[in-house]
Image (cartoon, rainbow, N blue to C red):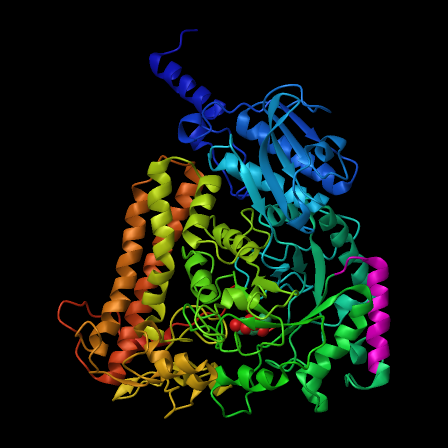
Amino acid sequence: MSLSLRTWAMLALWLVLLLGATPSRAEDGYDLWLRYRLLAPEQTKLYQYRATELIAGSSTSTQSVTRSELQRGLEGLLGRALPLSENVTHDGAIIVGTPKSSALIARLHLDIQDLGHEGYVIRSVVVDGHAATAIVAQEDIGALYGAFHFLRLLQTGQAIDHLDLHETPCVKLRVLNHWDYLNGQVERGYAGASIWDWWKLPDWRTPRYTDYARANASIGINGTVLDNVNAGATILTPTYLQKVAALADVFRPYGIRVYLSIRFSAPIEIGGLKTADPLDPKVQAWWHAKADEIYQRIPDFGGFLVKANSEGQPGPEDYKRTHADGANMLADALAPHGGVVMWRAFVYSASNPEDRAKQAYDEFKPLDGRFHANVLVQVKNGPVDFQPREPFHPLFGAMRRTPLMTEFEITKEYLGFATHLVYLGPLFEEVLSADTMAHGKGSTVAKVIDGSLDGHALTGMAGVANIGTDRDWCGSDFNQANWYVFGRLAWNPSLSSRAIAEEWVRMTFSNNESFVRPVVEMMMGSREAAVDYMTPLGLVHLMGPGHHYGPAPWDASESRPDWRPVYYHRADRQGIGFDRSRSGSDAVDQYAAPLAAQFNDLKQTPEQYLLYFHHVGWDYRMRSGHTLWYELVAHYTQGVNDVKRMRETWRSLHGYIDEQRYEQTAAFLAIQEKEAQWWRDASIAYFQSVSGLPLPPGYAAPEQSLNYYESLSFPYVPGFSSW
Ligand code: GCW
């Protein structure tokens, strides 16, 4: 049988594909930033680096996972397995551990006194005449963090011959909040169902739990709240606590503690009591017993997260008690075991006529100093609700005697769900670097939450997870960057979001500079693009009712006024914006005096917050010299153009990475452009119907009529149902 030339060519092509011509081998995103693919030496600064042997103990579970992570990572990155050794016998040894775990490390006499529980050093050292790299900590968990850092250096192609790194976390509790229900649904989740397979737990522990723990540990996350803040009582029943304990067992070697969201009325629902009044001794005794029961099963249990008297949840105010009464009662039950309460300040009430943005401050500020020592108050980054842009929450800097955590939303409820490419690093950084002026200049939100401003040792940062059962965990490759940047900033809130983006791109995709540079640029501009096409110039909360998908600035269908877009933008024939100045709701005076004065003054208010603080005439002259109406249309249009440019950038990068991830991103960017156009057009059509003004010259009219946009309805939006 003779084969034609064409057939030979086809066979050859198949062979090449089978062998997996490296850059284009399909990837499904499961490996996250821990891909450990063979390094291309020309794209790194590793030059002569040659790792020769690994010296790592395995007498504890954390040591074992550290060792296997290094083995796995080094083998993948360097293309060969590294022999394990007891002593340094060659140049290029990698030593990891603690002086307690290794006589060799004790012999190095590194200065590690100030590393604390989780810190580590990475040093280039000489041992017995051989060059080596030592990753050393006081405790096993620090060594694990150090190992991940070392791998990151390799993954991002950095020189590693003269290392002298010293790292300790700035924030103590670095915690993911899962808004997962026990039935598998994830509130505001756009990446499939809950990863907790409650039904099969505790007997079946999918390997995904271990990979989840690895990913978190690699970025320093050390806590996870498993269930939704809209909590049921069932999670506290023995059946479920057994399941929780199984997860805690999987996470323990990785330094991750488990926390639970609790339902304040649980003593009634599963305890048979008639009340959940925090001052009732029977209620207190019930919680003490429950805490004892939990710690019996999970000795390192982290504590409780509580949403109380907010959006219909029960709480201490049902019994005319304060948030402090409620938090302290739970805190006292946990204190003997070392647990904490993370009490959310996200409260606002339908019956309170006060500006919703003011209510949390009004309620919590007077309670400053009334919380017990193991309570943190968890405050959303902004006063409204995780909007594309809001000023920082005025509670930061205002509760000096209470440890405040910040809560960010990693899942993109208000920023385009799974498909829009929006890197949240710049949003997080904007909030963390905002100056509260509470202690004079330089009193940043970061210093409030890392405890340095007021000397708090108990500190924390929470992020609402974007993780689900999707193969890529987060619903898109680029959403993984938001999980990543949250963890890195929780470890050190003063890192730059750009540097973190670059790290992530290198680990997730490629070290090729021609790829890295444009992708980092694209990511860094993506959040501003979303602000522009959704809610420019300080507008907030204009999304569709309930499900929060797409634009609906006209909507007044929600049951509560403070859930309606019209409540927030207040557009009328004369102008637009919420007057929070002293002549309006006076929210400005919840900020420190210099900021209050600035925000109160229309002329001094940064234009990015203009319509958040002021009701402004359509013909108001902006700093550009254009009218407000002109600028509004220009920003909406800019947002769409930015997305078009993002698509062009991505198109120019075809071939640098595997087809599978390339194609999905390309397809998602197309969705984003379509939806950005929709946001722009629907918003302009609506605001034009209110302002009655013609479009500025050169700006295209909306593609459809306002009636059309208003007629759209979305009964099956992910992340939301009336469950
Ligand atoms: O932004 C809103 C969300 C709710 C969420 C609530 C909260 C868990 O739309 O889905 O409920 O915030 O943070 O409690």
Q: In this view, does 639 lie above or below 500?
A: below
Q: Is residue 247 visible?
A: yes
- Considering the whole magenta stretch, tell me its main secondary structure: helix
- Residue 140: x, y in percent? 72, 43
Q: Which of 48 and 384 is in front in this view?
A: 48
- Residue 97: x, y in percent? 70, 37
Residue at figure coordinates x 25%, y 82% from the top left: 689
Residue at figure coordinates x 26%, y 73% from the top left: 632
Judge left or right: residue 127 versus residue 236.
left
Residue at figure coordinates x 53%, y 85% from the top left: 359
Instruction: Residue at the far left: name it.
Output: 697
Q: Is residue 69 above or below residue 229?
A: above
Q: Is residue 719 visible?
A: no
Q: Quadrant of the C terminus?
A: bottom right
Judge left or right: residue 211 versus residue 372.
left
Total numbered labels placed on residues in the image: 0
- Residue 416: x, y in percent? 43, 62
Q: What stretch is highlighted in magenta?
A: 283-301
Q: Is residue 125 above or below residue 202?
A: above
Q: In which quarter of the image is the N terminus?
A: top left
Residue 299 inside the magenta-drawn segment = yes
Judge left or right: residue 9 versus residue 485.
left
Q: Which of 587 and 521 is in front in this view?
A: 587
Quadrant housing residue 693: bottom left
Q: In which quarter of the image is ligand 1?
A: bottom right
Residue 460 inside the magenta-drawn segment = no
Judge left or right: residue 77 versus residue 637.
right
- Residue 402: x, y in percent? 63, 75
